[in-house]
Image (cartoon, rainbow, N blue to C red):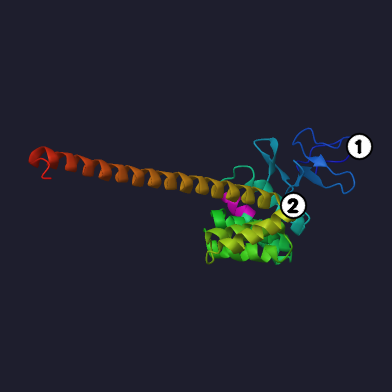
């Protein structure tokens, strides 16, 4: 009878999901996934006469591929991780990059930008998004555009930033679509605020002109009252 590769529970032949830990098995590869995300195997240990499972890999565990490392790192960051788990995720991305996987640039950029698992470093964030862009990762292109638009880790260049974001959007990047939508919304808001300010300035000028004219009229009337018409 097969065992779950995550928690070690016994599985029946026809079951594709572990009833104990919830791991779902890909029938073609026999690799476990949780929420469609490959995870690190766990090793059963004995504590207080009960079998529990450690998250620490042993020498008997087969090494994860770079794709699995990135997936596991993303899985950790997407589940409100503690600082130690953030660090573990960062190290997964670093290891994947060392294995030659360029897809690690994008999550590493996010880690550096947000200070997740490492010190916040805008220049390193820009570097990784730049590398992601030139590896045809269009989510990285969107983030590169955001960096250029706001001057994060590089000199501010709004035109160049929008160019990158539009390129990401045209390649179906959800990040690119979202950023472009937000930028257009802010530009529309800015134009509206400028129009309101212009109207207020025009109204203020009109009031000043009226006040000046009314003041001149009162002045003339007062002079005539005091001194009469000399003609």
Q: Position of residue 144 (x, y in %)?
A: 62, 61
Most foreground residue, 74 or 202: 202
Classified by dominant secondary structure, the portion drawn in magenta counts as: helix
Q: Magenta segment, which residues? A: 83-89
**Is residue 84 on the magenta stretch?**
yes
Q: Residue at x 63, y 47 (%)?
A: 181
Label 1 Cα neighbours within 10 Å, binned few <14 / some 14-19 / many ≥20: few
Q: Which quadrant: the N terminus?
A: top right
Query: Left or right: 194 with respect to 45?
Result: left
Q: Which quadrant: the C terminus?
A: top left
Q: Which residue is mark 2?
A: 172
> Gap in Å between the C-alphas at discs 2 and 1?
40 Å
Q: Position of residue 42 (x, y in %)?
A: 72, 46
Query: Left or right: 15 with respect to 168?
Result: right
Q: Which residue is mark 1?
A: 13
Q: Position of residue 177 (x, y in %)?
A: 68, 49
């Amino acid at each position: 009878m097969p065992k779950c590769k995550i928690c070690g529970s016994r599985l029946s032949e026809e079951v594709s999901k572990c009833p104990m830990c919830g791991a779902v098995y890909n029938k073609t590869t026999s690799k476990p996934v949780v929420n469609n995300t490959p995870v690190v195997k766990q090793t059963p240990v004995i504590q207080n006469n009960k079998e529990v499972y450690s998250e620490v890999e042993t020498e008997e565990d087969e090494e994860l591929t770079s794709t699995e490392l990135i997936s596991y790192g993303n899985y950790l960051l997407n589940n409100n991780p503690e600082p130690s788990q953030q660090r573990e995720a960062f190290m997964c991305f670093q290891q994947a990059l060392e294995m030659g996987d360029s897809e690690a640039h994008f999550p590493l950029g996010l880690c550096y930008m947000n200070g997740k698992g490492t010190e916040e470093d805008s220049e390193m964030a820009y570097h990784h998004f730049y590398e992601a862009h030139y590896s045809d990762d269009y989510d990285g292109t969107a983030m590169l555009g955001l960096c250029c638009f706001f001057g994060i880790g590089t000199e501010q260049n709004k035109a160049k930033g929008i160019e990158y974001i539009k390129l990401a959007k045209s390649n179906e990047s959800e990040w690119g679509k979202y950023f472009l939508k937000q930028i257009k919304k802010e530009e529309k808001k800015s134009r509206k605020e400028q129009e309101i300010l212009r109207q207020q300035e025009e109204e203020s000028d009109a009031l000043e002109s009226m006040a000046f004219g009314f003041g001149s009229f009162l002045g003339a009337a007062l002079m005539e009252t005091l001194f009469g018409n000399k003609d």
